[in-house]
Amino acid sequence: MVKIAFNDREKFGHVLVPAHHYSVIKNRYCIAYFGPMIEYIIQLKALLPIIEKQFPKLELYLAIRNELLYLIEDRQKTILKSEIPDFKDKIAYFREIKSDFYKHPILTILEESDIKIPKNYFPINEEPSIKCVIVTHGINPPTQSLNKEQIKKLFDMCQAEGYRVEIDSSIENAGWVVGVESPKLYKAGAMGIRTSLVPTGIGTELYKMMFANGNNGNVL
């Protein structure tokens, strides 16, 4: 058994399969998230290649709510919640993550499995634009949205650096995305856009591991 954050109690639906079939699917793992923190899907999708590289015997899948498929550009190795019954004899282990509002569940997986994110794995684009997007809204709990005073300070800070600042707009063609934990912030980081996190939630350590360990991000 590879060292990964799964165990026998998390077998897919506790379905018994013939030994010869289990030998075929034994390294197929699925991480599922069906909760409200949409950025978890983006984080997981970005991190799966890193996990697979460090555990080359693994074949990792991601299970999500049907209506969140729009977040996934590559449908490969993505299982919709409605499709789970069809995969019970194709996936050996299933782990559904949930937030307890105290510690980020994806950080828990990384720590349990001693998974390291390479420095500058998500490098900044060489020619960023002067568009800056401030992301003000988080899903509460556990992420607090920004108040008017915080937004004003961020606006002035970004403008002072020469950026054209927009509030909660599209991150398309952005050169800098600043704000709370959110799908926009993490999607921007994974795309190579400069990011800065305003730490109002429980994911600061995960953000640091993904982006602030290189030149792609910092915590304000």
Image (cartoon, grey):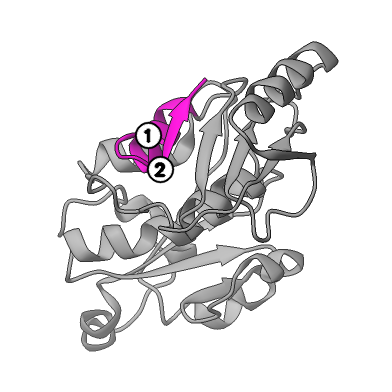
Q: Out of 171 and 28, give the one closest to the viewer.
A: 171
**The residue under label 1 is which amino acid type?**
Ala
* Residue that carries the numbered disc 2 in the rendered image: 216
**Residue 178 is covered by the magenta coloring:** no
Q: Above or below — where is 96 with respect to 145?
A: below
* Residue that carries the numbered disc 1 in the rendered image: 212
**Residue at the outermost right position:** 148
Q: Out of 135 and 127, give the one closest to the viewer.
A: 127
Q: Above or below — where is 6 with respect to 162?
A: below
Q: Secondary structure at mark 1?
A: helix
**Residue at the outermost top position:** 149
Q: Out of 157 and 76, give the one closest to the viewer.
A: 157
Left or right, 12 with reference to 209: right
Which x, y percent locates residue 214? 30, 39
Which x, y percent locates residue 150? 74, 15
Q: Which residues are magenta?
A: 204-220
User: What's the mark number on residue 158?
Assistant: none
| Crowdedness near tag 1: few (<14), some (14–19) or many (≥20) residues, C-alpha within 10 Å | many
Which x, y percent locates residue 55? 18, 62
Tell me what residue is drawn at x 68 percent, y 54 percent.
171
Left or right, 69 with reference to 148: left
